[in-house]
Image: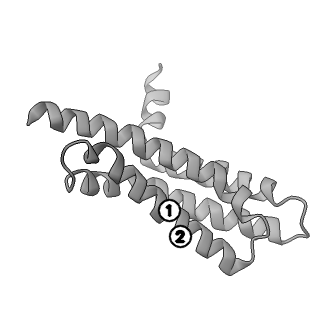
Amino acid sequence: MTATLRRLAGSGTVHVLFAFLAMGGWASFANRGHAMPQPLYSGLLQGALSACLTLFLKSVIDVLSRRFRGVTRFWAPPLIACLGSASLLTALHALIGTPEIAKTIAVPLLVSTSYAAIYNYSISRRRGAGS
């Protein structure tokens, strides 16, 4: 991997921008059967929410993972993050009138929950080995 590519892959700004474009694009696609400008609004909202979730999800998992012990530390933090994300996404998309809420949030929620579970597992294992 070249130094430039490695620097871009490690950049938080690149991650946030990618989340905005990928998940915002998905939301517009998921709502493509509805009249404009609704697919555009849904895409912009989902892009902004995904960018924010990308920025804050790691910090949330870091905090939650310290609050649980035993086996619970492996499943509770990602579950709480998933429920919080799903509630926020559903409420805000309902507020702006996104027609296809379930389709719109399915992919971003799957991606963010997968990340939360993998990241939480990795830090929980390390903490378990150090205790």
Q: Amino acid at mark 1?
A: Ser
Horizontally, is 19 left or right of 36 in the view?
Answer: left
Q: Are the residues tagged 2 and 1 within 8 Å (C-beta)?
A: yes
The answer to whether one can see residue 56 in this image is no
Residue farthest to the left?
Answer: 131
Quarter that holds the C terminus: top left
Describe the element under mark 2 as helix, strand or loop.
helix
Horizontally, is 41 left or right of 18 in the view?
Answer: right
Describe the element under mark 1 as helix, strand or loop.
helix
Residue farthest to the bottom?
Answer: 95
| Label ID, residue 35 | none
Horizontally, is 18 left or right of 32 in the view?
Answer: left
Residue 78 at x, y percent in the picture: 39, 50
Residue that mark 1 sits on: 85
Q: Quadrant of residue 103?
A: bottom right
The residue that appears at 47% across and 53% down in the rendered structure is: 54
Q: Nearer the viewer, residue 71 or 113?
A: 71
Q: Amino acid at mark 2?
A: Leu
Q: CA distance from mark 2 to mark 1?
A: 5 Å
Q: Nearer the viewer, residue 2 or 70?
A: 70
Residue 73 at x, y percent in the picture: 26, 46
Residue farthest to the front?
Answer: 71
Residue 114 at x, y percent in the picture: 49, 42
Residue that mark 2 sits on: 88
Residue 84 at x, y percent in the picture: 46, 65
The residue that appears at 63% across and 59% down in the rendered structure is: 47
Q: Quadrant of residue 121?
A: top left
